[in-house]
Image: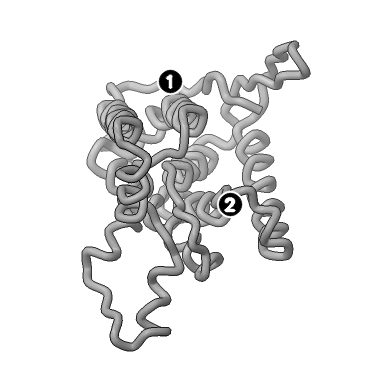
Amino acid sequence: MIPIRNAVPTRYPPVVTWMLIATNCIVFLLQNSLSPVELEQFLRTFALIPARYLEPLVYRDANLTAADFLPFFTMMFLHGGWLHLILNMWTLWVFGPTVEDRLGHGRYLAFYLACGLAASVAHFVFNPTSVVPALGASGAIAGVLGSYMRLFPLARVVVLVPIIFIPLFFEVHAFVFVGLWFLLQVLQGTVELLLPSSGGGVAWWAHIGGFIAGLVLCPLLIQSERRYR
């Protein structure tokens, strides 16, 4: 299911959502401008490679600095291809403005980054020996989905379900759409733990970690009715 529109109105321009989308697109264009060798070095520097953090435990003379933990943040602004970028930015465009409207610009930005960090930590915990660079805004956007479902579980979401070449459109409640999406992440993540070779390079546990962070943080950051005019 591909979300097309959510039915919750907003009052204020989603300037932070626009900024995040622009930043992701600019970084992706920068990635595309690099040569293969430069891109490999770029990803080794800014994408999250869990295994690198185990090296000090294996080689006692290896030391980690604060800069080595930068990928836990920077990975959420990188993408592996046009389709990866478009799907993530489209989902953020559909749901981000509503969550930003209820949290406020500053809190929303902090919320987004916190969900992205939670996603990185979750990926590291469940894939500590992985040498594959993890990248993408999916974990942070999963937090936005979790917040949206927490705030508006009965809101209507228009979704597209392509059947072969026939696009079918449906209206479903937010808790149905987001709940099914989350269930799929848990199933795929569990399968990946049992059969590591079946993961296909998707950071399922990053999605799960970001989503749970969104559910937990949203009630703490939402604006009061007095401030939300």
Q: Which residue is mark 1?
A: 9
**Near-viewer residue (23 or 159):** 23
Give how far across and how far down residue 30 sits, in percent: 28, 33
Distance between mark 2 and mark 1 Cα atoms: 31 Å
Pair 2/1: label in front: 2
Residue drawn at 57 percent across, 25 percent down = 3
Q: Earlier in the sequence, mark 2 or mark 1?
A: 1
Q: Amino acid at mark 1?
A: Pro
Residue 209 x %, y %: 50, 56
The quarter of the image holding the N terminus is top right
The quadrant the C terminus occupies is: top left
Q: Residue 18: x and y, percent? A: 30, 26
Q: Nearer the viewer, residue 92 or 103?
A: 92
Which amino acid, by three-letter code, is at mark 2? Trp
**Looking at the image, residue 219 lies above or below residue 228:** below
| Residue highlighted by disc 2 | 204
Inspect this view and state whether residue 191 appears.
yes
Residue farthest right in this picture: 164
Residue displayed at 60% across by 33% down: 174
